[in-house]
Amino acid sequence: MSLDMSIKPEGVDTRHGAILYLDDVTVSFDGFRALNKLTLDISVGELRCIIGPNGAGKTTMMDVITGKTRPTSGSAFFGQTFDLARMTEYEIAHAGIGRKFQRPTVFEQHTVFENLELAMKMDKRVRPTLFARLSSEQEDRIGAILRLIRLHGHEDRPAGLLSHGQKQWLEIGMLLMQEPQLILLDEPVAGMSDAETARTAELLNELRGKHSIMVVEHDMGFVAEIAQQGKVTVLHEGSVLAEGRMDDVQADDRVIEVYLGR
């Protein structure tokens, strides 16, 4: 069975072409501006890489998008429908924004298959969960995700026995099972081997166009692999310093000075 693995942005008004729009967002902590009038947008189906030095505001930006941090001023919209500044973290996740943190958080005592099953978007009340039986369509979806994340054949293996890279892929698969419309990935290849990093680049390139994805990453070689057809945004001191194709960003004197080095 061939499954359409793309996420349809149902319920999210994207007539203007953007699934995420941050407008003049400022976040202040005790007088320090972690974000300083930050403005950017992510198009439907776009894979956007966000780079910048430590303290540039990357994590705070993702916290604003997921509702963990409220902007001091400015606005953040998911499509034209959802004002993120007025929503709880749960409401934002339910609306279709999924976030993966740097450290993988999988259920290590459960198998790979069970992790994906537990993450599936379904009725999680106790009684339906206890008596639930997967439909053939749900089983097919898990099988498709297993192949996509390079864990086909490992479905019966306890997640705790996976390599670091495999745990990262499993967590990405768990995000996909929740059917998010926008995926936020925080340093997805940190701690990976070269081979795992290359396979992760292949995975994200396969997802390009089918999902809207924001990747925050420090590994410039990895960024170059996944940003060939899209934009790279450079943050510095809470604002956009530069934005454009990877070659242009790397050649920007301002970016070289504050981040890449000479």
Image: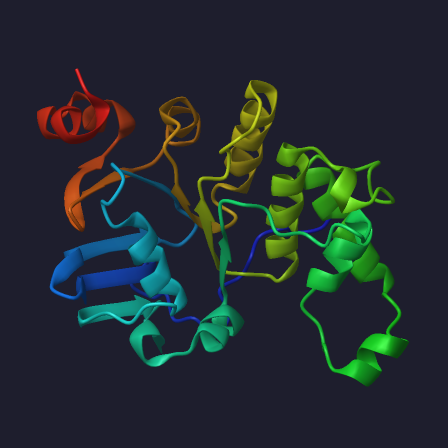
Which image quarter: residue 21?
A: bottom left
Residue 146, image x and y in percent? 74, 43
Residue at figure coordinates x 44%, y 40% from the top left: 187
Residue 82, image x and y in percent? 36, 75
Q: Is residue 216 above or below residue 115?
A: above
Residue 74, image x and y in percent? 17, 69
Closer to us: 184 or 28: 28
Q: Give the quarter of the figure containing the C terminus.
A: top left
Quick check: 46 left or right of 70?
Answer: right
Residue 9, image x and y in percent? 49, 64
For the image, the number of numbered tags is: 0
Q: Give the farthest residue toward the front.
A: 30
In this rendering, does residue 214 appear at all?
yes
Q: In this view, does 238 lie above or below 201?
A: below
In this rendering, does residue 1 appear at all?
no
Closer to us: 26 or 32: 32
Q: Give the farthest residue toward the top.
A: 262
Which image quarter: residue 20?
A: bottom left
Q: In this view, does 146 lie above or below 133?
A: above
Residue at figure coordinates x 78%, y 38% from the top left: 161
What colouring method underlies this structural image?
rainbow
Quick check: 191 left or right of 77?
Answer: right
Residue at figure coordinates x 84%, y 36% from the top left: 153
Residue at figure coordinates x 39%, y 37% from the top left: 217
Closer to us: 243 or 19: 243
